[in-house]
Amino acid sequence: MEFQGFQSAISPYLFALIAAILVFLAFVSYRKQSTLSLQLKILLSCLRATTFIVALLLLMNPFFFSSRTVEQKPRFIVLLDNSESTTISKGEYNGVQSYTDLLEDLALGEREDVDVDYFSFGSGSRQIQSEDSLDFSDPESNYIEAIAQILESESDYSASVLISDGIITFGRNPVISATELEIPIFTIGLGDTSKVRDIAINNIISNATGYTDTRHVVDVEISQNGFSNSESEIVIFNSIGESVASASIQFNTDEQVEIRRFEIPLDEDGLQPYRVEIQPLDDEWTNQNNSRTFSIDVLDSKTRILHINSEIHPDVKFVRSLLSTDPSIELNTLTWLGGNGFVEQEIPDFENLDLIILHGEITQIPLIELRDLIEQVPTVYLELPGTRRSFSNQSSYSLLRNIGSQVFELNLYPSSESDDHPILEFEEVNYSDLVPVLSSLRTEVIAPDATQLFGITFQGIETPNPLVAFSERGQIRRIHVSAWGWYRMYQSNNEWERDFISELFTNIVSWASNNPDNRRLKIEPAKSSFGSSEQVIINASLVNESGIPESDGAIEIHIFSENNEERVFNLSNLGGGNYTLSLESLNTGLFSFTATARKGSRIIDEQQGEFIVENSNAELVDIQRNDRLLTALANETDGDYYSFDAIDSFWADLVEKELLNSSTVSVDSYLFPIRSAHWFGLIILLLGAEWILRKYYSLP
């Protein structure tokens, strides 16, 4: 151990001066104690001076260095396949028993000439304590994760051992990634290479989302071996076991892969689970891979719109005709001509409206619940000639004020400040060639948060008067159109003009009816469907009322199963307004959740969602050991490949490649006394001894 110096900015000369002063003060402090003998004065002075010197030395932070050479054993990283396919008994391979026997024969953890770190892999990769930690439950085999694990820490190891059946069910082929390794991979193959008579559903190809009242395309990929000149049937079942689509399939050869396309009706919104089954045939090796589940997040495709008019005008017919031809819109109408009644005999349901179109002045509408609803639902307000708004007659949906007494033919032009607004996303048009609309020349914006979308040109001259304006207040969008006569464009002989007005009003309705995502709490599962053996991960982000990421919140989530069993969890805070929850595997079924975000006792936001946990048979589709992959991984890294029942030469080959040789490494170490409690214990001991002697001799 060699002294290296001090980690302090104090000069050694200043240190010596301070030390001398402290020693001098220690001896001077006992000089006038006449009741003490000279020997006792010297002893007490030495105790105090020693305490000062030791404390000063620790403050100077001295450090010492030493180096020694040690023999280091080679270290291996061992990756063990934890997927379900390793448990399949076929041919000479007897499932878990053969796997266990292999690990016992290798005795990786019992050898004294090598250190071993174990990792399991399947859907992901994780370190485990020993082979006994395997549960063979991963529903996928992702070899990219295994190779990434080796790449991450290969500098710590001499070689890697990968024990697997080589069957990829998720991710890319790992051979290219393996070429980046600088240590060899020794692969040991599990399973059997023989073929069996079997039919399997390989894959289901479908969009993750769909829309109600549509037919959704689903492609089912089927493979078979050994069933030439046979026929089977494929059926798709919904969540309550009803058949929603079916087809027969003819097998003409001994080995075949077929894709069948289905169109299934989507009637209900929400996360909908489905199951695909193919009828098993006699002498199949297993029926477990004859079915597979998938899910579709079905969105409500209908936009519920209520159109209320207070005047008979061709614009009313134009708007209603345009909306009624759109299959994604559910249109309800009310015609109010004053007084206490409507033309319609039946008042439509006001629940779950996405948009209210107000055509004309309706501030005196008789239905109180409708007047209240207008304050809470997005609106498009279209003015008509007989109901133009006055100074005193204003409502929350009014963004403009039309104060002119005369009506002119006017052309519209887009305002430069709104060039990139979604409403303006249509083909370029020469606005001066459009049929004029009717309005006054005196309009102004009255809502402080409103933005002009279109302005007015009169006789080719642009004016500052707005024609169309929009606003977005929280989750409520509003549009105000202060002109009429749009029907004349809709009836134009020019196709481009008819297309323009149709696109303009379609865009207006679409933008206004789409609720902006102003959620403070955004929470959703990592994916809509999880395997029964994988972790369920739910991620969330949280902002406060000012839109700033909330890092000090608490998010509580209640998860409900199909039979209403409830479990409560708290999401982990990742910082920066991000939160997450990882749940161990759940039983299969449809789960719903309600999440509440709080800060202290204040509720910031609440949200709901769904996810599905389903059985996966991906590990039962391809059950033939992939010797080609395992051999390629070994060859690309200068390793070797072995079958599970032929590992006799495994250790001898490692010896031949000199991978079991110990190496001599230099181990450097530094000692910092300030980090040791012993020196502070010495200071306390010295101070304690001085205190005891002072008390014994009754010193002040």
Image (cartoon, grey):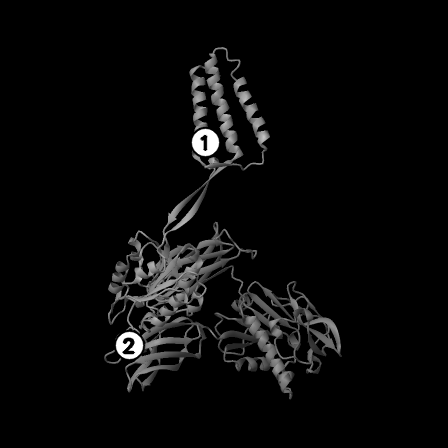
Image quarter of residue 76: bottom left
Which residue is depicted at the point 25% across and 64% down?
A: 98
Q: Label 2 to label 1, Cα distance in Å? A: 73 Å
The answer to whether residue 73 is seen in the rendering is yes
The residue carrying mark 1 is 680
Circles 2 and 1: CB distance less than 8 Å?
no
Which residue is depicted at the point 66% across and 76% down?
A: 483
How many labels, in total?
A: 2
The answer to whether residue 699 is seen in the rendering is no
Q: Element type at marker 1?
A: helix
Local crowd size for mark 1, using a 10 Å CA cut-off: few (<14), some (14–19), many (≥20): some
Q: State which quarter of the image contains the N terminus.
A: top left
Q: Which mark is residue 195?
A: 2
Residue 334, how many percent across, how many down?
54, 76
- The disc labelled 2 sits on which kind of residue? Lys
Residue 295, how many percent across, how many down?
39, 72
- The disc labelled 1 sits on which kind of residue? Phe
Residue 615, how many percent across, how many down?
33, 68
